[in-house]
Amino acid sequence: MGIFDWKHWVVILIVVVLVFGTKKLKGLGSDIGESIKGFRQAMNDEDKSIDTATPPPAAAPLNQPTTIDAQAQKVAEPARKD
């Protein structure tokens, strides 16, 4: 006999039905089912769009020289007091 005994679950179920009513619980169950179905459908649509996407363009050869355009600037240092 633990906290999750079947008798406890029956009491909890009866209390939930009394508080919310069967119509509201039925509506809640169908809403949850529709949201799960929509989530699965969205995940499947996303997987299909990833599969049908165009392949990335071919990368440049690895040994090609590249140029980096940068400009160095000297930063003035604060005067030191001895």
Image: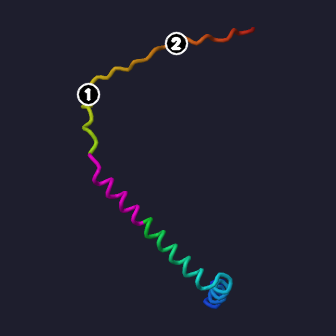
In the rendered structure, which disc, 1 or 2, sits on the residue that comes first in sequence? 1
Report the quarter where the C terminus lies.
Answer: top right
In the rendered structure, does residue 28 fall within the stretch colored magenta?
Answer: no
Report the quarter where the N terminus lies.
Answer: bottom right
- Disc 2 is placed on an element classified as loop
Residue type at mark 1 is: Asn
Q: Would you say 1 lies left or right of 47 here?
A: right
Of residue 30 and residue 76, the one placed in the foreground of this image is: 30
Look at discs 1 and 2 and give the one toward the viewer.
Answer: 2
Q: Would you say 25 lies left or right of 35 here?
A: right
Give the residue at x 26% y 32%.
Answer: 60
Residue type at mark 2 is: Gln
Badge 1 crowding class, 10 Å Cα cut-off, few under 14, some 14 to 19, many 20 or more, is: few
Name the dominant secondary structure of the magenta segment: helix
Mark-to-mark CA distance, 1 and 2 = 30 Å
Q: Would you say 12 lies left or right of 56 here?
A: right
Q: Position of residue 30 (x, y in %)?
A: 50, 77
Find residue 73 and name its label: 2
Q: Position of residue 44 (x, y in %)?
A: 36, 62
Q: Would you say 80 lies left or right of 66 here?
A: right
Determine the image quadrant of residue 23. bottom right
Q: Which residue is mark 1?
A: 63
What's the magenta region? 40-54
Give the residue at x 26% y 28%.
Answer: 63
Badge 2 crowding class, 10 Å Cα cut-off, few under 14, some 14 to 19, many 20 or more, is: few
Instruction: Classify 5 as above or below 59.
Output: below
- Disc 1 is placed on an element classified as loop
Label 1 close to label 2 by CB (< 8 Å) = no
How many labels, in total?
2
Q: Position of residue 19 (x, y in %)?
A: 68, 83
